[in-house]
Image (cartoon, helix red, strand yellow):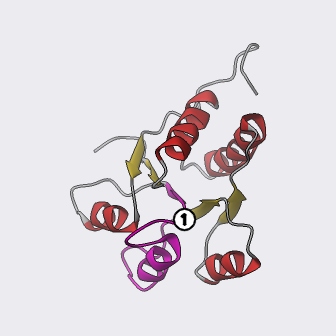
Amino acid sequence: MSLLKPILLVEDDVVDAATSKQALQDIRVKNPVIHKMDGEEALEYLRDPNNDRPAFILLDLNMPRLNGIELLQIMKADAELQHIPVVALTVSKYEQDKLDTFNFGVAGYVIKAVDYDAFLRSMDIIIQYWAWNGLVEKEKETDNARL
């Protein structure tokens, strides 16, 4: 098992997944990123006792098979999974999606920005919060760092 807990990225869109991974790399996150394509794959990962528990989950809401809201519902009903922090990472601007995710106790709700720099700033805020709480580690910033 790794000393740094992984970040679990649950995202079915390969471009959005690559963008999220690149953003985490650009803001110098040291934690490994585990990518799963949908809620079913994420649930299999989470229920496997051989896998490290994630520091937190970045969760897309609109996915095939088992979507983000359905995964949240299952996680919050499972005593082993209900305390894992989840940040909804989505293009959805529907108020009902926000309400549904917060009713399931998400730690945050981030709209995926079309502009990469805006998305990068949002991801950096998320990572700073989890770094302050000791769940994520970043490399030290240098003078020529992107942010």
Residue sitting nearer the eye, 128 or 66: 66
Q: Is residue 24 above or below residue 39?
A: above
Residue 44: x, y in percent?
A: 27, 65
Q: Is residue 75 left or right of residue 44?
A: right
* Residue drawn at x 54%, y 50% as measured from the top left: 135
Q: Is residue 145 above or below residue 111?
A: above
Looking at the rendered structure, the number of numbered marks drawn on it comes to 1
Residue sitting nearer the eye, 139 or 124: 124
Q: Which residues are magenta?
A: 56-84
- The quadrant in which residue 139 appears is top right
Q: Which residue is mark 1?
A: 85
Where does the C terminus fall, quadrant-wise? Answer: top right
Q: Classify mark 1: residues with Cα within 10 Å, few (<14), some (14-19) or many (20+).
A: some
Q: Is residue 27 above or below residue 107?
A: above
* Residue drawn at x 57%, y 42% as measured from the top left: 20
Residue 16: x, y in percent?
A: 55, 45
Where does the N terminus fall, quadrant-wise? Answer: top left
Q: Is residue 47 left or right of residue 123?
A: left
Callout 1 secondary element:
loop
